[in-house]
Amino acid sequence: MIKAIVTGHSRGLGAAITNELLARDIAVLGLARRPHPDLAAAYPQTLREVAIDLADAAALAHWLDSGALRAWLADAGTVLLVNNAGTIGPVGALSVQDTAGIARAVALNVGAPLVLAAAVAAGVPATVERRIVHLSSGAARRAIAGWSVYCATKAALDHHARTVAEDAVPGLRICSLAPGVIDTDMQTEVRGSAPENFPLHAQFVEMKRSGALASPADCARRLVDYLLAANFGREPVADLREVG
């Protein structure tokens, strides 16, 4: 039996990935601050939801210590972890960034994915295949003015995947995957940024106006195809638009 964990499953790309997995009869454990009532109604037998703020390191540690994750994975033959949850902010030059916002972004964008990856790696017998995907970004590989926190946290996921791949743990594959520019709430937030804090503001507004943003559903289909493919994790850092 394949079982998946998806963070930030209640909206945007996370919801689309969850829907795609459930539609393929893959049971999903969704971790987010809020539930997704429509998915819960459509898949009452295969979707389990946990209300948790993944930016709260203590709350995440408490939940993992409860044994709930190990119990849910007990009958899995293959485990998929999709580290999707993240935040774009704080946006702006270093001098205008909110320090509490920085700490929250690092906890959500880096701390939670690394903790969950380790929990999944250790939470099942070595004979169970484990596939971990970090949702990265082109911003991990390109410095973008106003996005120092986002760029740095996504770059951290890339290097985590590279290093875990070097560990060569039997039965474990990992990839930090940039999905492209998707039409989600995060893009709405980007377009809502103050232009003086984000010099590329006009470029992102134009991408929306011209229809250049990919749909979450299409991205989710391609991502799940790759996650289940024989070549998943061959490269620890990849771009969804380039994998085949």
Image (spheres, grey):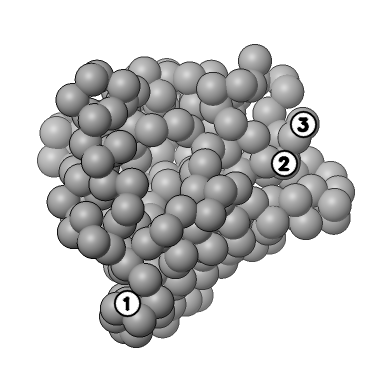
Three-letter amino acid code of the residue under disc 1: Gln
Residue 86 seen in this snapshot: yes
Task: Name the element at disc 3.
Answer: loop
On the image, which quarter does residue 26 sit in? top left
- The residue lying furthest to the top in this view is 244
Rendered residue at 18%/25% (across/down): 209
Disc 3 and disc 2 in contact, CB within 8 angstroms: no
Q: Indicate the secondary structure of the residue bearing disc 2.
A: loop
Q: Are marks 1 and 2 in contact (CB under 8 Å)?
A: no
Residue 125 image position (x, y, % from top left)? 73, 51
The percent coordinates of residue 63 (x first, y second) are 41, 71
Label 1, on which residue?
A: 97
For this rendering, which residue is in front, 179 or 190?
Answer: 190
**Could you tell whether 76 is left or right of 232 in the image?**
left
Residue at image point 24% right, 41% down: 202
Residue type, numbered disc 3:
Arg
Which amino acid lies under the numbered mark 2 shown in the image of this protein? Pro
Q: Earlier in the sequence, mark 3 or mark 1?
A: 1
Tag in front: 3 or 1: 1
* Mark 1 surroundings within 10 Å by alpha-carbon count, few (fewer than 14), some (14 through 19), many (20 or more): some
Q: Which residue is mark 2?
A: 236
How far across and down, in percent of the image, does residue 110 sit?
Answer: 51, 64
Q: Disc 3 versus disc 2: distance between alpha carbons?
A: 6 Å
Q: Secondary structure at mark 1?
A: loop
Answer with the quarter of the image where residue 194 lies: bottom left
Q: Residues within 10 Å of mark 2 (few under 14, many from 20)?
A: many
Mark seen at residue 115:
none
What residue is shown with label 3? 234
| Quadrant in the picture for residue 95 | bottom left
Residue 94 drawn at (x, y percent)? 40, 76
